[in-house]
Image (cartoon, rainbow, N blue to C red):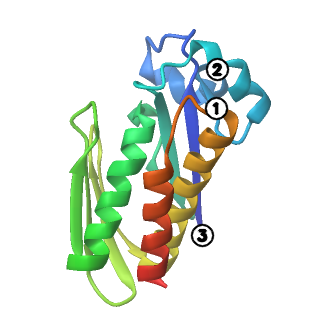
Amino acid sequence: MFYVNTLISRPDRKINDISLLKSNVEEYFVQINNTHEILALENLLDFDYLNGAITLTYCEQTLLDVTLWDLVDQLWAYILNVVESLLTTGEGETYFPDQPVKLHLKSISVDLVLYEIEANEHIKVALPKNEFIQTILEGADDFFKNMEECFKGKCSYQYEIEKIETLRRTFL
């Protein structure tokens, strides 16, 4: 079972110690579906450089966590490109927008995808392909649609939302 979530960095809080980050997530980030708190940050956010994090777990294994925060809207767009490449060629990879973290996906069978992320730790795990892709597409869709709903006119993710729909049609 997968769990994906997107968080927006609180612009008024500086992350000085990564070791404290995991135990104090709410101090530094707001979940994308916490509309009230997200809207309270509106005047502080820089929509050209939107910092945040994507968390992804499979069963009990953490695949992405808040310590790999980055320009979150760009990261989601990059991940969609990797999924598109995976679906068309069987393999895809990208670096995170603003740090030296590499994500690599490779189809290893009809039912499995090899997920690999190279950061401070190297994670390499075989995952159920269909469930993984569905989770990624749902997480990206949730993020982009929530951003557009909350910040009408300040950001536009129509291209990404249309790409998600195209990938769903391709995938399903």
**Residue 104 image point, x, y percent:** 24, 59
Relative to 163, is 144 above or below? above
State the SS at label 2.
helix
Give the mark count. Answer: 3
- Please rate how many residues cluster around mark 3, counting C-alpha atoms within 10 Å: few if below 14, some from 14 to 19, many from 20: few
Q: Earlier in the sequence, mark 3 or mark 1?
A: 3
Res 36 quadrant in image: top right
What is the CA distance from the residue labelled 2 to the residue labelled 1?
A: 8 Å
- Name the one closer to the observer, 129 or 11: 11
Residue at 72% over, 25% down: 39
**Residue 113 image point, x, y percent:** 34, 75
User: Which kind of residue does numbered mark 2 sit on?
Assistant: Glu
Residue at 21% over, 36% down: 100
Marks 3 and 1: which is nearer the front?
1
Residue at 36% over, 54% down: 79
Q: Is residue 124 visible?
A: no
Residue at 28% over, 72% down: 86
Circle 3 is placed at which residue position? 1
Of the numbered discs in the image, which one, if any, rests on residue 151?
1
Q: Earlier in the sequence, mark 2 or mark 1?
A: 2
Marks 2 and 1: which is nearer the front?
1
Placement of the N terminus among the 4 image quadrants = bottom right
Marks 2,1: beta carbons within 8 A: yes
- Please rate how many residues cluster around mark 1, counting C-alpha atoms within 10 Å: few if below 14, some from 14 to 19, many from 20: some
What is the CA distance from the residue labelled 2 to the residue labelled 3?
A: 33 Å
Q: Is residue 166 visible?
A: yes
User: Which kind of residue does numbered mark 3 sit on?
Assistant: Met
Circle 2 is placed at which residue position? 42
User: Which kind of residue does numbered mark 1 sit on?
Assistant: Phe
Res 3 quadrant in image: bottom right
